Amino acid sequence: MSNDAMRSETTDLRKLLVVGNGMAGARTVEEILKRGGRTLFDITMIGDEPYGNYNRIMLSHVLSGEADIDDEDLLLNPMSWYRENGVTLYAGDRAVSLDRFAKSVVCESGRTVAYDVLIIATGSNTFFPNMDGLRESDGRLARGVFGFRTIADTNGMLQMAEAQDDVAAVVIGGGLLGLEAAYGLRTQGLDVDVVHSPGHLMNQQLDERGGRVLRNKIEALGVGVHTSKRTTSVLRTSEGAVAGVGFDDGTSLAADMIVVTAGIRPNVEFARGGGLVIERGIVVDDQLRCEDEGSIFAVGECCQHRGEVYGLVAPLWEQAVVLADHLTNANPTAAYHGSRLTTKLKVAGVDVAAMGVKGPEREDDEFVQFYEPRSGTYKSVVVRDGKLIGATLLGDISKANFLTQAFDEKVPLPEERISMLFDMGTPTAATGAAELADDVQVCNCNGVTKGQIVACVHAGAKTMIDVTAKTRAGKGCGSCKGLVADILACAAGGAVVPDPAADWYVPSIPLAKPALIEIIRERDLRSVSQVFSELAAGGREDASAKMPLASLLRTIWGPDWVDERGALFINDRVHANIQRDGTFSVVPQMKGGVTTPDQLRKIADVADKYHVPLVKVTGGQRIDLLGIKKEDLPKVWGDLDMPSGFAYGKSMRTVKTCVGSDFCRFGLGDSTALGIALEERFQGLETPGKLKLAVAGCPRNCSEALCKDFGVVSVGEDKWELYVGGAAGAHIRKGDLLATVVGGEEVLRMAGIFIQHYRETAQWLERTYAWVPRVGLDELRRVLVEDGDGIVAGLEQRMQTSVDGYRDPWQDRAEPKSPAQFTPSLPLLPLPQVPVR
């Protein structure tokens, strides 16, 4: 039944409006729905970002390359969730004014939404200190300055890092978020410095000694650390680009990118404009009701309860439960009394746990401290009147579970206080899971207790995937996964079983990739909708499965698959790479990195004609035109009159080459010619993850062939070494030597069977640097080099079919696939423009 139809039959429902679609607002709606809220309320949500609800904690993983923007762990509630639960979501719109007397909210789009009950969950904003040069004259942040709060912030940093070589970044703020940003940017290969005004890092959670240990860990990553430094200005070039930061002592630090993580402030402007009581945040009582209001509530980082505002997720979950109990009358006596904060997380790869006070505050406070800088370990506890009032663990957090229980006064303290930090009579890490109380919060990121995990197991969950899917435990920073697994094992009494779904190609279809390919061929399924109809439970479509299924169908059928536009990501629909401001990047093909004066003239003419703001040489020896409007893409392709370079999709990207034997005095083989031959043969091939190749004319490795998905190195006498599974991005891995072959034709043949085997057996988004170790080098040699399973001929045949079906996608300019394919639609939000150098 549609939402409109449902509403027509339930006109007596009260109108519940939630302003804010972040983690607090969406979690509150989830809790309301769990308590039968769908029969009580007609629920509407307003979110100013054009997405469903996502996990902001995961943004640090995206920045470091450990997760992708389209990772399912990032998106907590996809758009389908709102439809399935009868929730109206106005995404990409912003609530701008509140009329408490008319009980209505007006949005930036002009839309007016009425309510009976209003929940304000507007969260918090990045705090940008008052610094000279931070903003443009119109108030926008200067080009190259970022917060670290949203998907747009994260995308902007990643795209600037990719668009420019040798980027130097300064992170202002050495708290949790700043160190995560620094770690992510350093992982992306940037030179990074952290500037922190207080005397030591993470001063909110750590004392001076703990901060010193953490500093050693951070500096060991190659990140510069500057404490007791107050940033007073952003230095700019004459063109307006960032050049560095200036300090109050007159010194400065050069930088191309500045990330401000100097704290957050509750986002209260909407509430203030509506006349609500504001102090540090929106003032609320124990039922989260706004002061002097009967039908307006606030939850999350925007609210102030008993003088406190909270910036961690655990209190948000507690508030959401109380508010849901109150609004649905599930527990009329529900009240929020504040939160005792305990934090267990991983900061820039370093385990940290903290709770309560950092050090002694009275003369009679007991303070036990262990400090070992060499091993990077720091531990301390503070005891007052026989009760644990504070604990800090850094490096070794094996006692965190016991200390959490002690902090909550659920277990007595040992007489020998030092045994709280080491296994000297207190529960060991191995037995800690069994001895945890049921109400101990295990996953701070998603507010999951041990009791909820145990109940989930008793209800039938027998695998980590089951538990994670039903409770979300482990879907945040990931530091609790080991403990969740221990609790699962204890609760299941040894009945933990391997999860068959771990091998499924997509979660909605219970088949591993080889079996799925076989049944698709048998039933001649050529569209994503056909696959869902015949193979998914109840024929239900799953939005997260569309892209991997579209990729698989293109791999199986080549040009004969049925192209359904809705199954493709925007990059694949328009054959260009979307940028954070809604424009696109166009990369024409330059085979083997070789170009001509005629091509260069065309590129220059196009850049002038379409006012391209940035022309950039890529790491793959091509030229990138950034800032193209969607509606201009067909005209740009036509004026270039060059084939697509496939820089936008999960496909074979480029073949990088050195100059080889023709010009280089060290060259042993014609790497340029072989690179061009490889690119001509495999151009545009659909692959599970992007595929990068390189050919080196000698072992000096000038083209970086040793760290590509498929690398070829000449060793003389027409012999070529073939390396597979290399990486040199967020992950660093030297390729494994698969074989040494003679002649360029044999290189092409071996490349073909390797790529086809990868296409047919790797999981969606699994790069070769993960696939090769998983399958095993010896197994790959047995299957591909020795043909131990007799499949090589089939791989060659299917590869040839795919190669024969190649068509330059930029030919779509003549016959668009849909009326909207190249019509203007972005930007959805007024975002900063692509940086211009």
Image (cartoon, helix red, strand yellow):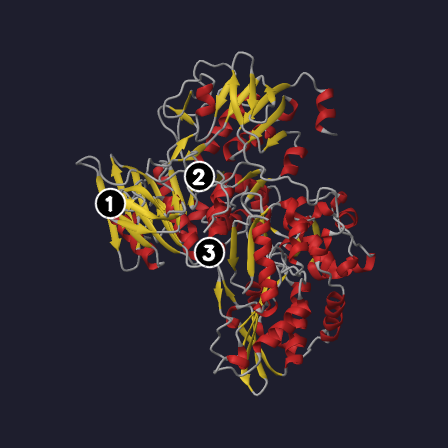
Q: In this figure, which residue is indicated by the disc labeled 2?
A: 440
Tell me the quarter of the image containing the N terminus: top right
Residue 168 visible somewhere in the drawing: yes
Given residues 230 and 618, the one toward you in this image is: 618
Q: Amino acid at mark 1?
A: Ser
Q: Amino acid at mark 2?
A: Val
Does 10 sit left or right of 710 as displayed? right
Q: In this figure, which residue is indicated by the disc labeled 3?
A: 164
Seen from this angle, which residue lies furthest right?
A: 523
Residue 427 visible somewhere in the drawing: no
Residues at marks 3 and 2, CA–CA distance in whole angstroms: 47 Å
Secondary structure of the residue carrying numbered label 1: loop
Residues at marks 1 and 3, CA–CA distance in whole angstroms: 31 Å
Residue 320 drawn at (x, y percent): 50, 29
Above-or-below relation of 774 to 208: below
Front disc: 1 or 3: 3
Residues at marks 1 and 2, CA–CA distance in whole angstroms: 37 Å
Does 457 sit left or right of 170 as displayed? right
Above-or-below relation of 773 to 294: below
Q: In this figure, which residue is indicated by the disc labeled 1?
A: 228
Secondary structure of the residue carrying numbered label 2: loop
Q: Crowding near pointer 1: few (<14 within 10 Å), some, many (20+)?
A: few
Front disc: 1 or 2: 1
Query: Which image quadrant is residue 789 in?
Result: bottom right
Residue 768 drawn at (x, y percent): 58, 65
Given residues 498 and 594, the one toward you in this image is: 594
Q: Amino acid at mark 3?
A: Gln
Residue 70 drawn at (x, y percent): 58, 48
